[in-house]
Image: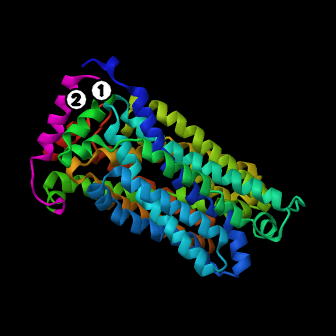
Amino acid sequence: MEKTKQNLGYVISLSVVAAIGGFLFGYDTAVISGTVQQVTQQFDLNSMQVGWFVGCALVGSILGVSIAGMLSDHFGRKKTMILSALLFSASAIGCAISSSYAGLVIYRIIGGIGIGIVSIVSPMYISEVSLPKYRGSLVSLYQLAITVGFLGAYLANFNLLRLSISGYAPAGELMGKILVTEVWRAMFGAETLPALLFFAVIFFIPESPRWLVVKHSEPKAQKILMRILRDDKEVDAQIADIRSLSNVENKSEWSLIFKPGIFRAVLIGAAIAILGQFMGVNAVLYYGPKIFQDSGLSSGDSLFYQVLVGLVNMLTTVIALLIIDKVGRKKLVYFGVTGMIISLMAIGLYFLKGQAMGLSSVYLLVFFLAYIFCCAISICAVIWVLLSEMYPNNVRGLAMSIAGFSLWIGTYLIGQLTPWVLEHLTPAGTFFIFTLMCLPYLWLIWKKVPETTGKSLEEIERMWIKK
């Protein structure tokens, strides 16, 4: 096959547009970390209400993933991404102007629905337009965008908090309320601009050619694939390959899900999705400032530490993006999760013995950054790649929704229960639990998931069907 004809630049541009959804995912997820303390004080929340304030968006995410597959399989990947952009915009504006705790929760749920939808559709779209040789790196662009969103939220939170305590006095009562007295409103509202940008640029990308073939719109698919592959024979061969697998079964999507090989892939995908959430990463992303404050830092320093966490997360994801198609999915997980286990044990021991040993908070920061490095280069980079490529074209949206549903159930439980666990089991006990949860994940990836690096989506589908 002549690789030089392929239009990699065009594929990258499509992937970047879809990855903006990942930025919104990351920002909407991480912005909560800088608002928890302020919102808690303003609305006098107890620990369970704090957990609900954090976890309500995750309920929205569960709702979002529940419908994302059906929407994307019926209406297409592009229209479903447009819907998610509208939901992000509504959430950002609504949170910024909300006058009550109940209203804030409602708008957070709306944003969560957007997160749930885009978490399925964006990586799926990138996977379906990608070239096999570069698919791991291109889908990892989505994860990179999530980390950029995390960092953007941390930087916004940090700088807006600094502005609010600097003595700055903006003109007008409303701006004073948003930027000084209730700065959490500005933290939420800053998401409006990237949400509107996402909404605008989606109109400039085509629909997924694989979805078009499944929906019997082969002339449109052929036009898009021609722009990607630049070879008539290669385009015809790929359409024929997609069509041959799409026509193997004419049953409903749910009937196909329960075929032995496909059902096994769905179960494994759901298992790695939910297990990954109990290994601590979202607890750090949501409650990092509180954890750092518990170690003796001021609120300003704790937010600065969280910025460093976000920076390491982003830069490590860049490394993962560059090596995932060379090293392979499974090796990244094997070495990365091993490093996570060591780092989590060190964090637990710090909270258990650090004060008695006279260790400064700098050691805690080093342990956290090591953990984030290992996590970002392994499970965070690999999970969306695996989920986007391990299911057949006919049921990819539905199967990813099932895996996404499991992922967000786990994320919700972590968001809701972490404050209680930190309070009742101590930080040390919490991180030792995260350590134990790494073990079944490591075994499942290494023993039950095939290596997919460099293979086409159709080749991967055949691997699962044969099992």
Task: Tell me the SS state at disc 2.
Answer: helix
Q: Is there CB contact under 8 Å for labels 2 and 1?
A: yes
Along the line of sight, the residue nearer the viewer: 284 or 119: 119
Specify whether residue 371 is in view. no
Q: Residue at 21% across / 25% down in the picture?
A: 234
Determine whether the residue tagged by mark 1 lies in a helix, strand or loop.
helix
Residue 401 shows in the view: yes
Q: Is residue 163 left or right of residue 95?
A: right
**Amino acid on which disc 2 is placed:** Val
Report x, y in % for residue 97. 66, 71
Q: Which image quadrant is residue 437 in?
A: bottom left
Task: Name the chief secondary structure element in magenta.
Answer: helix
Compared to residue 371, the image places residue 405 above or below, namely: below
In front: 337, or 379? 379
User: Residue, x 50% and y 40% (percent of image)?
Assistant: 377
Please give the range of residues in magenta.
229-254
Q: What x and y, as percent, mark residue 172?
A: 83, 67
Q: Who is closer to the viewer here, 28 or 291? A: 28
Residue for badge 2: 235
CA–CA distance between discs 2 and 1? Answer: 7 Å
* Residue at 18% over, 35% down: 239
Residue 229: image tag: 1
Give the x, y percent position of residue 357: 75, 55
Side of 334 relative to 430 (left or right): left
Magenta stretch: includes residue 303 = no
Vertical arrangement, residue 3 with respect to residue 365, above or below: above
As for residue 240 lying within the magenta part, the answer is: yes
Q: Earlier in the sequence, mark 2 or mark 1?
A: 1
Q: Residue at horizontal 59%, vertical 63%?
A: 92
Residue 34 position by quadrant: bottom right
Q: For residue 466, which numbered disc appears in the image?
A: none
Against 248, is 178 above or below? below
